[in-house]
């Protein structure tokens, strides 16, 4: 199992988007010396870069942001949106679009 903090994931995604998978793997290995080989690093990079929300955004798909179980996970809709903004670079216009799509989907056919 491998985990990175949100800031590191954002850097890896940025390198991936700007310079490609191999450059992102090099950056990941620079930060985590315990990754033994490039193939392992590339698998980790793909897992970071291929997060469903990043894919949905890139493809222009409609999706919502919500909390599954705020009590046990100590989160709120605000904290989830802050996490999405810091991790994936979403801004106010992105959240406005997500909100509009969510409302359209919620009341479609009613």
Image (spheres, rainbow, N blue to C red):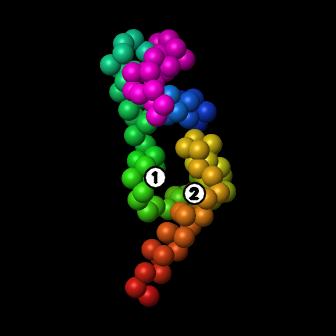
Q: From where the camera sits, is residue 77 visible?
A: yes
Crowding at dot 1, Cα within 10 Å, few <14 / some 14-19 / many 20+, comes out as some
Q: Give SS at disc 2.
A: helix
- Residue at image point 56% right, 30% down: 11
**Which residue is tagged 2?**
94
Q: Give SS at disc 1.
A: helix
Query: Of all residues shown, which one is farthest toward the bottom?
Result: 110
Crowding at dot 2, Cα within 10 Å, few <14 / some 14-19 / many 20+, comes out as few
Q: Is residue 12 above or below residue 106?
A: above
Q: Nearer the viewer, residue 37 or 3?
A: 37
Q: Which mark is residue 57?
A: 1
For the record, the magenta segment spans: 16-34
Q: Position of residue 15 (x, y in %)?
A: 50, 28
Question: Considering only order in the chain, which callout, 2 or 1, is on the residue closer to the N terminus?
Answer: 1
Q: CB under 8 Å between callouts 1 and 2? A: yes
Q: Position of residue 92 (x, y in %)?
A: 65, 57
- Residue at image point 53% right, 63% down: 98
- Residue at image point 43% right, 43% down: 51
- Residue at image point 44% right, 21% down: 23
Q: Position of residue 55 (x, y in %)?
A: 40, 47
């Amino acid at each position: 199992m491998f985990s990175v903090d949100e800031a590191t994931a954002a850097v890896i995604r940025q390198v991936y988007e700007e310079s490609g998978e191999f450059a992102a793997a090099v950056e990941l290995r620079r930060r985590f010396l315990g990754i033994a080989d490039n193939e392992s690093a590339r698998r980790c990079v793909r897992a970071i870069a291929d997060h469903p929300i990043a894919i949905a955004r890139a493809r222009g798909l409609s999706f919502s942001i919500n909390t599954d179980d705020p009590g046990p996970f100590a989160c709120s809709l605000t904290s989830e949106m802050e996490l999405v903004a810091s991790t994936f670079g979403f801004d106010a216009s992105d959240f406005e679009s997500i909100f509009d799509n969510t409302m359209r989907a919620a009341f479609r056919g009613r």
